[in-house]
Amino acid sequence: MPRVVIVGAGFGGLQCAKRLAGKPVEVLLLDRHNYHLFTPLLYQVASSLLNPSDIAYPVRAVFRKDRNITFRVAEVKGVDLERRVVRTEGGDESYDYLVLATGARVNFFGQDALAQRAFWLNDLPGALQLRNHVLSCFEAAATAADTTGAADATGTSVRRLLTFVVVGGGPTGVEYAGALAELVRLIAANDYPNLGRDDVRIVLVEGTGRILPAFPDALGAHARCRLERLGVTVRLSELVQSVGDGTVLLKSGQTIAAETLVWAAGVTPNCLSDGLAAPRRPNGRLEVDACLRLPGQERVFAIGDVAGYVQGGAELPLLAQPAMQAGRAVAENVLRDLRGLPSEPFRYKDPGIMATIGRNAGVALIRGVALTGWLGWASWLAVHLFFIIGFRNRIAVLLRWAWNYVFYDRPIRFIVREARRGVPHVRA
């Protein structure tokens, strides 16, 4: 049977493979992780609401009944378009059809210091590291307040420990800032009675003139109002110039004393730039035609964040829905080609955009209809719950949301770090 190699088990790659399940093709799905990650809820892992297992699902479990699909954990190094092979660390994999769904990675815009000091919400290890760090800041601040009332032994002030700077006013930054504000409100008074809410400061920094720039102005203004009611300080038209030990310097000249910088200011396509000779758009995304094929390559496709597909004069956004629809469309075109039929152009159907800003607060634009407040929040809950992979995961997420809503409790407040090799475990 013809061999289809799909690189990436994200939203696009998974949908492409699912559409090819049971069809007369041999599918090889490659990913560096053995799980599919529901990235829109990563910020809830970082804010102690969800477990990692609630938003991740084993890829092999998705296709355990599909005999024509093989999954392999592999780090893809590049693609040889002339030889029609995918280069991995374990050897070359030949293909008849190739689908690149490699997603995106964090974009620090060339600021190496940010890459070394910032936290991000683009993968599961990053979310867990951020959760550990935030909780550790509260523990250190509580100890410092007990011992000196102002500073610990290293001279780090309580205020600096409890100041959190979130860079990026898109959905990820807004949602995490709101979730962090609720976490602070829920745990500061209960778990740390020697710390007050006034000791905690959350600053959202956005480079444009308003947050949620992809939304209509009214929805962006509503989101800002809700954030400020939660105690978040919103700084617009500001950029981060540099990051030091316990300081964040803005381009306006203001210095913020903070131990935490969360980078949610953008991503860049992960195009295998060192191992793929293919034309790119100015922003780094791969050039594709109307059928999502690379120029001059009838059987090589790019979908999702990596594909620079233009519709209506603008590129499709780096969101889950464009990737999922593109994955299904490419699978259909592969099957059409096998039947000797011409490929059909891809047309993205925009289902809308939405973001949540904490309890009972959300904004959504669904087919031209704007929703705010409880309606926007409920719509966000329903849509995200529907697209989570796995019935168990849906039930787990729903129960955790319900528990948090009723009892005002985020129970997953664990600081978990990797054990050092060679250090024996001693039970107290």
Image (cartoon, rainbow, N blue to C red):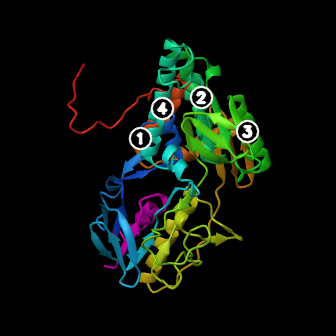
Type of amino acid under label 1: Pro
Q: What element carries label 4?
A: helix
Q: Measure the alpha-carbon separation of dots 2 and 3.
A: 15 Å
Q: Which amino acid does label 3 sit on?
A: Arg
Question: Tag 4 or tag 3, which sits nearer the N-term?
Answer: 3
Q: How far apart are marks 3 and 4 (CA)?
A: 26 Å
Q: Which amino acid does label 4 sit on?
A: Arg
Q: Are marks 1 and 4 in contact (CB under 8 Å)?
A: no
Which residues are drawn in magenta?
A: 1-27
> Mark 1, residues whose alpha carbon is within 10 Å: few (<14), some, or many (≥20)?
some
Mark nearest the camera among 1 and 4 is 1
- Looking at the image, tell me whether mark 4 or mark 2 is earlier in sequence order: 2
Label 1 to label 4, Cα distance in Å?
13 Å
Mark 2, residue position: 182
Instruction: Kindly identify the residue that appears in the image at 61 percent across and 25 percent down.
Output: 200
Q: Residue 52 carries which label?
A: 1
Q: Of label 2 and label 3, which has the lower sequence position? A: 2
Tag 3 or tag 1, which sits nearer the N-term? 1
Of the residues under marks 1 and 4, which one precedes in the sequence?
Answer: 1
Looking at this view, is 80 or 57 the one in front? 80
Quarter location, residue 340: bottom left
Q: Looking at the image, which residue is at 45% across and 58% down?
A: 10
- Above or below 395: residue 269: below
How many angstroms separate mark 1 from mark 3 (CA)? 29 Å
Residue position for label 3: 224
- The reply to whether callout 1 and callout 3 are in contact (CB within 8 Å) is no
User: Where in the figure is residue 405, as x and y percent of width and height?
Assistant: 56, 27
Quadrant the C terminus occupies: top left
For residue 400, which numbered disc appears in the image?
Answer: 4
Q: Which amino acid does label 2 sit on?
A: Glu
Give the CA distance from mark 1 to mark 2. 20 Å
